[in-house]
Every structure is written in structure tokens, then in C-alpha cells.
Image (tube, rainbow, N blue to C red):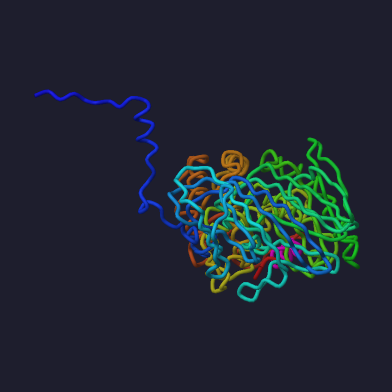
């Protein structure tokens, strides 16, 4: 007997497709992305495309009030999902409906929507909250630095949990609108461009916009009194720099350094290709910080960077991150070399440009300063471990690896790699393994063993593998730029 194949009509097919998943298909999203070093950073089950933060901050009391709207897409059928956040929440709505919520772990906010969320759906999440961020301690630490006239948040690898709910891992980047109201006479700085500014009833509201993907830890906020300058690069890119007038003896050197931002950016474009974002600049607040951070479009500089005078090298380092670390971000925190090795090497290239020591001379000096039994060589820049993530070796050995690569493949291929990597991977995420494969493809050379020796071998690579053999003797003159380069890297150690 022949059987007829029954094909449902359009209406019937529509009904079939509309059948919801069974209750068993809806499960909670993971409380972390499974990062090698920070397994509970970020969350599973969704990806954020945009953050809209509407905030109000009172410096006198350290009270931050906020409404955060997250636009996201589900990546699984969700019965519940997590946000990373630490302040007190008063209400959460998912797709306009009130959601139940609870806290767990160190910074997990568990959200249960009124109805389960199907995979592949666009969702909106609105979180209302308030609190004093400087009083929020996680493992005894706060990323929010209170100042005499405001507050600043700029930390790595975590900072968002102190001031807005998020999917707090670099693998989930998004665009941002950040609106912050502060008392008249106080200023508020953030990433991107200042879209508008209004004053009403004693409060001034600043509206900042970042229109390209941005990691949560690269999102910054600085509230206080600043001397702000604006400019444009030769290509018309807006430059916004800010310095606290209360830096004391460091004021002049801080301003003299960051006011070269446009010049440095133009030079870096010749090395790494077109600048990837809608503005550039930097800020130096009145906080006793001994580190700098590549917060996107607007790097943060601790005033200690200028203790010994003008320091353009640190500006070069943080601006190089806009390509290496910000536009192309790491996939996993073990891939920190993707950020720091290249930013450190940019300082070597700047030294070469300024006639204060070539990159080769710096490589020879670093190689010679560390004998084979120095613990320096036991740190693996390609996977240093969470406790060594910002070790000096990640910077210095990391940069040394790049000079060795330059020598191995030649200048033409090497600088082609430096420029094409951030162009072909713009706004994405990448691993050390991805870079190794990329370098092999672009150079046409097998490089796996080479990179293993320089990035993963817990011992000193043999002389000649990218450095001159005589460097092993230790009789290498210190390049003029070295003290400033070393001081910049020392600022990051333990950060």
C-alpha cells in the first residue's frame, strides 16, 4: 500500500513551530563563563549587546543611584540567569515584567523572570539599585576609589560589579550609553564621546556614548573636579584629556604627558593601523593609585606614574592597548599576553623612534639582565597563572618574545602582522593560540616551537633565538629609555 505524505499547510506549520519547549528544556544559566583564572566571572545563557546606565552620584555621601537597562540575546532556554553585581537592588524587570531575584556567592545576582526565556530571543533587563560603592568589599577589596570631591572606578580584572550589573567577562563586549548626574560644579568622565550635557535644579547630567564593543572592565567612571582639554587628531578624532588640579607636584608632569595623546595616537596608527574607536584621551584623578589602566578610549593614569616627571612611555603603553586588549580582547584571562606583551613592545618601538634605544638593544638588555636561574624565566607569559598575571615577566619577557619574532620572520612580515592582527580581528576576542596560528599564516613559517620557547617554556630560551649571543654575558649597556619603561611595568605588578 502506498502512503500519502501529509504536508501541513502554512497555518498548521506555524502552530507546530509555536509549540514551546518543555519545562525540562529550560535550565538556569551558568554562574560563570568558565574562565581559567576566574571561573565565576561572567555568566552563561545570554550575551549582552548594549548597556544603558542612568546614574546619580552624591560625592558627599558616596551614594550611587542607578537604573541599568541591558539589551541581550539568550543563547539557551533559560529558567533563570545571573548578573554580576554587588550593590543593593530594589527591582528587576525582564521584558517589562517584574522578576524575582536573589543573591549568591561573592557577586552573583540570580534573576528569575516571570516566564521562562526561549533560546535565541532578544530580551531587555532593567535593574534599579542604590548603594555606597566604596563600602562594598569583595575579598576585602573595593574597586571604587573615593576622592575628596568624587569617586573613580578603574580596575582590572573586575570593576563593574561595584557600579553596574553586567555579564562581567571580556568575552561578552557591548556598546554603552552612560548618563551620570552630579552636583553642579562637579564633572563626570566616562568612555567615548560626550553626547550632551544638561543642568537642572543643582545637578548637571553628562551623557557619554561608546558606539563600539567594550569589555566591562574597560568601562570607567570618574567624578570630581578636573581641568579638561579637548582637541582633535590630524584625522579629526576627538581628544578629551582631564587632570585633577589637586595633583600637587605631579600636576605639570601629568599634563605634559597626557597632552601628547594625539601625537602618540597618530604614531601608533602608523604601527597598528587605523584607530578603532570614536574618541581618545586620558585622565589623571586625585587618587593615590600606583597603576595605569587602558580603559577604552580614556585610559586611567595613577598620579604615581608621574612621580619622577614626564612619562610619555606609560601613555604609549595604555594607548597601544586600544588596539591590543581593547579592540582585540582576550578570550580567557590566561591570554593576558595578547594585551600586555604588545603594549610593552610598543614602548620599545617608541624608544626606537625617539632614539633612546632600539627594540633590539632593549631585548639584548632584558635577556642579559636575567641569568638562567632567575625566577623571571619560570613565569610563562602565554599562561602565567592568576597569581602571576601582571608579573614583570609578562611585560618584559612578553615584549622580548615579539622582538625575537621580528628577528625570525623579518621586518616586513613582522610589521605586517602587527598591523593586520587588529584589523582582521577588530572588536573581537582572541587567544594566544589564535595569534600563533595567525603569525604562522602571515609569515609562512612554522612557529609553534618558537612560541613555545618564548611564551610557555619555564626556562631561559637559548641565546640566538631572537637575541644576539653576546647578550648572555650580561655586558650590555642600559638603553636610555629603560628606567621609564621599567617603572611603567612595575606600576602594574600586583595590580
| Spot occupied by residue 313 in the image (x, y as percentages of width and height) | 76, 56
- Judged left or right of residue 461, residue 190 is right
Q: Residue at x 58, y 67 (%)?
A: 107
Q: Residue at x 74, y 53 (%)?
A: 316
| Spot occupied by residue 420 in the image (x, y as percentages of width and height) | 59, 39
Quick check: is 181 in the magenta stretch?
no
- Judged left or right of residue 482, residue 258 is right
Q: Quadrant of the C terminus?
A: bottom right
Q: Quadrant of the N terminus?
A: top left
| Spot occupied by residue 167 in the image (x, y as percentages of width and height) | 57, 55
| Spot occupied by residue 153 in the image (x, y as percentages of width and height) | 72, 62
Residue 475 in sight in this render: yes
Tell me the chief SS of the magenta region: helix
- Judged left or right of residue 99, residue 267 is right
Determine whether 323 is above or below 306 in the image: above
Q: How many marks?
A: 0
Determine whether 455 is above or below 21 in the image: below
What segment carries the magenta color?
Answer: 482-490
Quick check: is 489 in the magenta stretch?
yes
* Of the pair 143 and 96, the residue shown nearer to us: 96
Q: Residue at x 65, y 45 (%)?
A: 175
* Of the pair 270 and 103, the residue shown nearer to us: 103
Amino acid at each position: 500500500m502506498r502512503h500519502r505524505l501529509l504536508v501541513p499547510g502554512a497555518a498548521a506549520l506555524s502552530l507546530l513551530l509555536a509549540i514551546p519547549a518543555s519545562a525540562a528544556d529550560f535550565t538556569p544559566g551558568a554562574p560563570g563563563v568558565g574562565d581559567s583564572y576566574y571561573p565565576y566571572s561572567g555568566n552563561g545563557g545570554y550575551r549582552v549587546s548594549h548597556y544603558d546606565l542612568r546614574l546619580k552620584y552624591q560625592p558627599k555621601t558616596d551614594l550611587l543611584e542607578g537604573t541599568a537597562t541591558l539589551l541581550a540575546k539568550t543563547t539557551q532556554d533559560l529558567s533563570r540567569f545571573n548578573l554580576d553585581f554587588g550593590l543593593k537592588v530594589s527591582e528587576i524587570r525582564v521584558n517589562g515584567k517584574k522578576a524575582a531575584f536573589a543573591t549568591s556567592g561573592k557577586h552573583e545576582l540570580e534573576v528569575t523572570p516571570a516566564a521562562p526565556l526561549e533560546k535565541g530571543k532578544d530580551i531587555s533587563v532593567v535593574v534599579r539599585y542604590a548603594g555606597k560603592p566604596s563600602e562594598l568589599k569583595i575579598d576585602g577589596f573595593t574597586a571604587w576609589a573615593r576622592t575628596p570631591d568624587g569617586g573613580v572606578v578603574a580596575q582590572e580584572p573586575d570593576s563593574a560589579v561595584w557600579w553596574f550589573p553586567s555579564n562581567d567577562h571580556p568575552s561578552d563586549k557591548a556598546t554603552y550609553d552612560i548618563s551620570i548626574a552630579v552636583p553642579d560644579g562637579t564633572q563626570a568622565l566616562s568612555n567615548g564621546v560626550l553626547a550632551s550635557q544638561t543642568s537642572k535644579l543643582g545637578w548637571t547630567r553628562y551623557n557619554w556614548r561608546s558606539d563600539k564593543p567594550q569589555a566591562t572592565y574597560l568601562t570607567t567612571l570618574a567624578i570630581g573636579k578636573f581641568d579638561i582639554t579637548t582637541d582633535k587628531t590630524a584625522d579629526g578624532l576627538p581628544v578629551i584629556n582631564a587632570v585633577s588640579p589637586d595633583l600637587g607636584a605631579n600636576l605639570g608632569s601629568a599634563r605634559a604627558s597626557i597632552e601628547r595623546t594625539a601625537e602618540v595616537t597618530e604614531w601608533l596608527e602608523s604601527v597598528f593601523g587605523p584607530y578603532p574607536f570614536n574618541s581618545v584621551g586620558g585622565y589623571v584623578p586625585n587618587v593615590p593609585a600606583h597603576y595605569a589602566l587602558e580603559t577604552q578610549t580614556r585610559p586611567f593614569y595613577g598620579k604615581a606614574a608621574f612621580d619622577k616627571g614626564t612619562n610619555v612611555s606609560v601613555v604609549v603603553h595604555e594607548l597601544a592597548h586600544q588596539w591590543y586588549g581593547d579592540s582585540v580582547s582576550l578570550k580567557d584571562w590566561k591570554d593576558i599576553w595578547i594585551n600586555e606583551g604588545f603594549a610593552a613592545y610598543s614602548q620599545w618601538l617608541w624608544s626606537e623612534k625617539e632614539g633612546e634605544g632600539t627594540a633590539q638593544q632593549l631585548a639584548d638588555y632584558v635577556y642579559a639582565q636575567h641569568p638562567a636561574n632567575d625566577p623571571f624565566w619560570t613565569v610563562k607569559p602565554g599562561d602565567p597563572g592568576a597569581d602571576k598575571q601582571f608579573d614583570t615577566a609578562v611585560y618584559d619577557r612578553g615584549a622580548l618574545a615579539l622582538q625575537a619574532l621580528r628577528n625570525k620572520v623579518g621586518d616586513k612580515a613582522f610589521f605586517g602582522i602587527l598591523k593586520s592582527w587588529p584589523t582582521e580581528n577588530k572588536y573581537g576576542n582572541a587567544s594566544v593560540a589564535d595569534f600563533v596560528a595567525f603569525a604562522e599564516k602571515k609569515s609562512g613559517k612554522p612557529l609553534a616551537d618558537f612560541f613555545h620557547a618564548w611564551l610557555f617554556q619555564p626556562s631561559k630560551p637559548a641565546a640566538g633565538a631572537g637575541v644576539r649571543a653576546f647578550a648572555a654575558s650580561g655586558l650590555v649597556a642600559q638603553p636610555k629609555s629603560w628606567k621609564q619603561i621599567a617603572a611603567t611595568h612595575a606600576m602594574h605588578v600586583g595590580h
